[in-house]
Image: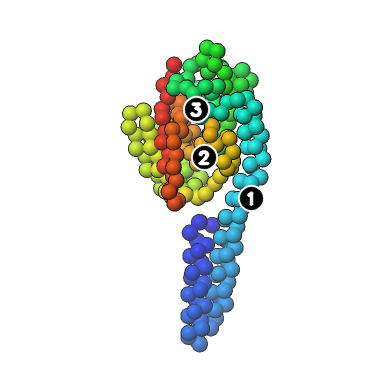
């Protein structure tokens, strides 16, 4: 059920109950109102708690990824790579040191990768990897970044109500409004490398559409809005 439906049903139910009490001839509205409130509460409970349960269950896997990243000593911002560079799937490269360009990528045996002379890092799948696969299969990705982000995140995944994109030089600013909260790994160390779940999806879609490596420069939230600033990295 749509995220706005639950509170709407509850409010309408209350209105019907009040009308049923005020007008004796409309007494049956009381039962209808109570039913609508019950449905609204169930919809609201199911929508929020189900997402939280799924996120909580998924956090165990991300705890393992975080442990791998930390044990490898690779606590750096990841670089999102398009499928054309990373063997068919949008992936995130966690480099051994901060980088501003990506050399010829060579997969040693995932998750190990060489991305330049003597440079090694981890090549991982991310929430954005799966999101891009879903949206690509649904035909939601085009050559236009704004259209692709809107098709994928708003229409296909229903994670936001609207998206605004501003491109300037080698930077892209993406603002998502009316967010549907989703957080797979909380404030664990993996967040430093991947960014938030939604930022990961934004960066992955951008990398695939622009067909260049992308880094999340910064992100900030305000209410139910998220601003993600991306940097486009040139291939060496």
Distance between the alpha carbons at the discs numbered 3 and 1? 29 Å
User: Image quadrant for the C terminus?
Assistant: top left
Residue drawn where x is 47% and y is 41% of the image:
152
Residue drawn where x is 67% and y is 40% of the image:
60
Residue 13 visible in the snapshot: yes
Distance between the alpha carbons at the discs numbered 2 and 3? 14 Å
Q: Is mark 1 in CB contact (under 8 Å) with mark 2?
A: no
Percent x, y for residue 100? 44, 22
Residue identified by numbered label 1:
53
Percent x, y for residue 15? 48, 75
Query: Can you tell which mark lies on residue 196?
Result: 2
In this picture, is 13 found above or below 207? below
Observer-nearest of 33 and 214: 214
Residue identified by numbered label 3:
79
Judged from the image, the secondary structure of the residue bearing numbered disc 3 is strand
Residue drawn where x is 51% and y is 45% of the image:
157
> Which mark sits nearer the N-terminus, 1 or 2?
1
Judged from the image, the secondary structure of the residue bearing numbered disc 1 is helix
> Which mark sits nearer the N-terminus, 2 or 3?
3
Name the front one of labels 1 and 2.
Answer: 2
Percent x, y for residue 212? 44, 25
């Amino acid at each position: 059920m749509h995220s706005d439906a639950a509170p709407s049903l509850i409010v309408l139910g209350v209105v019907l109950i009040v009308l049923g009490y005020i007008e004796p001839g409309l007494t049956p509205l009381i039962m209808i109102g109570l039913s609508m409130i019950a449905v609204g509460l169930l919809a609201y409970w199911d929508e929020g708690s189900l997402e939280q349960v799924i996120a909580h269950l998924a956090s165990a896997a991300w705890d393992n990824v975080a442990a791998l990243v930390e044990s490898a000593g690779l606590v750096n911002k990841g670089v999102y790579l398009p499928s054309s560079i990373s063997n068919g799937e949008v992936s995130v490269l966690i480099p051994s040191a901060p980088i501003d360009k990506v050399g010829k990528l060579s997969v040693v045996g995932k998750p190990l990768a060489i991305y330049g002379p003597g440079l090694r890092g981890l090549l991982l799948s991310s929430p954005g990897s799966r999101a891009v696969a879903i949206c690509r299969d649904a035909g939601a990705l085009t050559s236009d970044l704004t259209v692709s982000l809107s098709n994928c995140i708003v229409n296909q995944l229903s994670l936001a109500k609207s998206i605004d994109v501003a491109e300037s030089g080698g930077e892209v600013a993406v603002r998502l409004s009316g967010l549907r909260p989703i957080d797979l790994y909380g404030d664990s160390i993996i967040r430093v490398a991947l960014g938030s779940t939604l930022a990961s999806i934004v960066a992955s879609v951008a990398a695939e559409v622009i067909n260049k490596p992308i880094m999340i420069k910064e992100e900030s939230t305000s209410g139910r809005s998220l601003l993600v600033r991306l940097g486009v990295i040139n291939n060496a």
